[in-house]
Image (cartoon, rainbow, N blue to C red):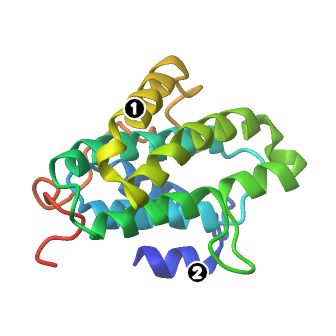
Amino acid sequence: MIEGLSELKTVALADKRPIVAQAMARILVDSTREWLVRCEAAYGLGQLNYESGVDLGLIAHEVGQLAVQMDEKVLEQPKDRRWRLCYVKLYGAFKPLETGGAGLLKQCQEKGSLASSRAAVNGVFEKLLPVISAVIKRPENLAGPHDALKEYLAASPPRGDRIHSSEEPLHSKPSSGAGQPAETPAAGG
C-alpha cells in the first residue's frame, strides 16, 4: 500500500489537505508496525510532491527517530543483511535513489515554498548519513553515529507535531497495528 501511495507522488487529494502524507507519516511513527513497512513509509514520504504548508522538518525528525529506534536492534543483530534495505530506504527519503526520484533534501533546495524546512531537513540528514554508512559498511561501528543522531534529535525538536495545520497531530492516537515490531526488519523473512 505504501509503495502505491508513494508512486502517486501526490500529497493531497481533491480537498487539498495532505491526507496521503498524513497517512504515510502516521505509519512512519507507528511503533507497532514492522520496521521495513515504516522505512517504506519514510521513503514514500520523500517521494511525494510537496507544496507549501507541509512541515518537512517534522517528517525528517521522525525519520531520524525511526533510525534511532532501529539502531538499537541493529546493534543486537548486526549481521542481519535485511537492515541494509531498511537504511537504504531512509537514505531515499532524503535523496533520490533513481533518476527522476525526489527526496526531502532535493525538494527543500529546489522549491522556495519549502525553504523554511531546509535547515531542519539538512540537520537530520547530516547526522543520519554516518548512521546509514555504518549500517551498510560496518554495523559494529554504529554506536558513535547513533549517539550523535540521538543527541541531535533531542537538541533539535520539531516545531510541532502536525505535518500540516489541517491535520491531526502525528502522536495523538495510537494507530491500529499488529503487536510489537519484529526483531528483524521483516517478520518471517
Q: Are marks 2 and 1 in contact (CB under 8 Å)?
A: no
The part of the image, by quadrant, that contains residue 135 is bottom left
Q: Nearer the viewer, residue 135 or 29?
A: 135
In the figure, is residue 50 to the left or right of 152?
Answer: right
| Mark 2 vs mark 1: in front | 1
In the figure, is residue 133 to the left or right of 118?
Answer: left
Per the image, the residue denoted by label 2 is 7
Per the image, the residue denoted by label 1 is 144
The part of the image, by quadrant, that contains residue 120 is top right
Quick one: quadrant of the N terminus? bottom left
SS label for mark 1:
helix
Q: Earlier in the sequence, mark 2 or mark 1?
A: 2
Marks 2 and 1, how far apart at CA? 35 Å
Q: Is residue 142 visible?
A: yes
In the figure, is residue 54 to the left or right of 177?
Answer: right
Quick one: quadrant of the C terminus? bottom left
- Given the image, on which type of amino acid does mark 1 rest? Gly
Q: Position of residue 36 (x, y in %)?
A: 32, 66
Q: Is residue 101 above or below residue 161?
A: below
Q: Is residue 20 visible?
A: no
Q: Nearer the viewer, residue 122 or 157?
A: 122
Residue drawn 21% across the image and 70% down it: 186
Q: Of all residues shown, which one is farthest toward the top?
A: 155
In the figure, is residue 36 to the left or right of 4?
Answer: left
Q: Position of residue 62 (x, y in %)?
A: 46, 42
Residue drawn 47% across the image and 47% down it: 63
Residue drawn 14% across the image and 71% down it: 187
Numbered label attached to residue 157: none
Residue drawn 67% across the image and 68% down it: 96
Q: Position of residue 139 (x, y in %)?
A: 32, 51
